[in-house]
Image (tube, helix red, strand yellow):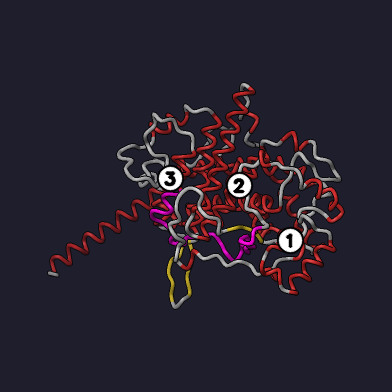
Amino acid sequence: MSRGARRAGAGQGAAAAVQLLVTLSFLPSVVEAQVSGVLDDCLCDVDSIDNFNTFKIFPKIKKLQERDYFRYYKVNLKRPCPFWAEDGHCSIKDCHVEPCPESKIPVGIKAGGANKYLKVANNTKELEDCEQASKLGAVNSTLSNQSKEAFIDWARYDDSQDHFCELDDERSPAAQYVDLLLNPERYTGYKGPSAWRVWNSIYEENCFKPRSVYRPLNPLAPGRGKDDGESFYTWLEGLCLEKRVFYKLISGLHASINLHLCANYLLEETWGKPSWGPNMKEFKHRFDPVETKGEGPRRLKNLYFLYLIELRALTKVAPYFERSVVDLYTGNVEDDADTKALLLSIFQDTKSFPMHFDERSMFAGDKKGAKSLKEEFRLHFKNISRIMDCVGCDKCRLWGKLQTQGLGTALKILFSEKEIQKLPENSPSKGFQLTRQEIVALLNAFGRLSTSIRELQNFKVLLQHSR
């Protein structure tokens, strides 16, 4: 290369560096300006959620996720994709999920009939643990042992019509416990046709969209041309509230997952010691108004909307957990009492939030039409929960299933108000029930949203410092 060419290349590099600095200095103000104000379809503003989450919810929900009851999640990562032929599982090492040995699971959690179907339970040590758990009477780990007889009757109740998700069969030999703290959600490198196909199926085949709209809903879809999104969002605002809400929930969930990946990104790997942290370039790629043709801030606003929906569900379900009959049972009496006290403290905070989403505005029209729309809404979301079994990366599948199930549980709660109000104090209710699987998913999914909003604040600070 000639000296002149080198000088020219250096000049271009300097110009590019200056342009990058200008872009980065502009980004924080743009993000802050566009991700602010009152959210659509509710009376809550972004700043109120930021302050509430930062100072009240985030510290407590983080502690709750570290408690034994909420850190172990039973999931089947081997269910076949029900919609298309398997693409093969991701071979990237960071896609791997390490199941938790049965011997590490607190005895109160693994108690019950499901345990006997697992191979690991066949050895003497595990059988002794099962017998001990049986003596404790923990047929279901959400209930104190004096509720055993009532629970047996409760368990016969088939509430499949209330489920917004297809639940894993915890009795399946393929279902395993996973320690969520040892398998954190982060960027794994899983992308390409497999990931695109999953999100494309979610957006294009399950979000409500009339045939007259040709623009892809999937933000990963190529070929959007010069569409800045305004015509699409004008159409979206013309939909009924329920269908707008559905799209915002999916978009908010997608934004939350993307924020987790940007915030916990593999920055470098030196001598086998990986370094994980925030990746500003990746954040900009997914949320910068310029790179996303104005859609990045909309996605982030949908994250706040989703947060409000799940926050409302926690407030609505508080009476279920406030009953003495419900015990977050692991076998350690003192820890269990502390865990429940922490959960009830979180519920008190959620109740104090002054600007909740009003779910009564949904499915409130003609009774017959509202019932039909609600069922269509439920089945669309249930289908999305099934698509999670098509994710090729095990770690992505784990967190996708958990967060989808958490949102599905929140929706189930929001539309079970009458059943929750009728809950008996000293026995389980046949009209409304939550399995431990649903409870763990609900609180961890909300914890992920709380973390996403906290990470968004961190990115704003990092981008400001980079100017």
Residue at disc 1, secondary structure? helix
Horizontal side of 73 relative to 149 (left or right) equals left
Q: Which of 376 and 238 is in front in this view?
A: 376
Q: SS for tag 2? A: loop
**Cα–Cα gap, marks 2 and 1:** 21 Å
Q: Distance between the residues labelled 3 and 1?
A: 37 Å
Q: In which quarter of the image is the C terminus?
A: bottom left
Q: Mark 2, mark 3: which one is toward the viewer?
A: 2
Rendered residue at 25%/61% (across/down): 13
Disc 3 secondary structure class: helix
Magenta stretch in the rendered image: 172-198
Q: Is residue 183 magenta?
A: yes
Q: Name the residue under label 1.
A: 109
Residue that mark 2 sits on: 166
* Residue 401 in magenta stretch: no
In the rendered image, residue 194, in percent from the top left (x then y), is placed at: 42, 54
Q: Earlier in the sequence, mark 2 or mark 3?
A: 2
* Kind of residue sitting beneath label 2: Glu
Distance of mark 2 from mark 3, alpha carbons? 20 Å
Crowd rating for badge 3 (residues with CA inside 10 Å; few <14, some 14–19, many 20+): some
- Nearest the eye: 145 or 303: 145
Q: Hey, what amino acid is under mark 1?
A: Ile
> Does any portion of residue 34 appear in the rendered image?
no
Q: Horizontal and vertical percent for residue 19? A: 30, 54
Disc 3 designates what residue?
A: 200
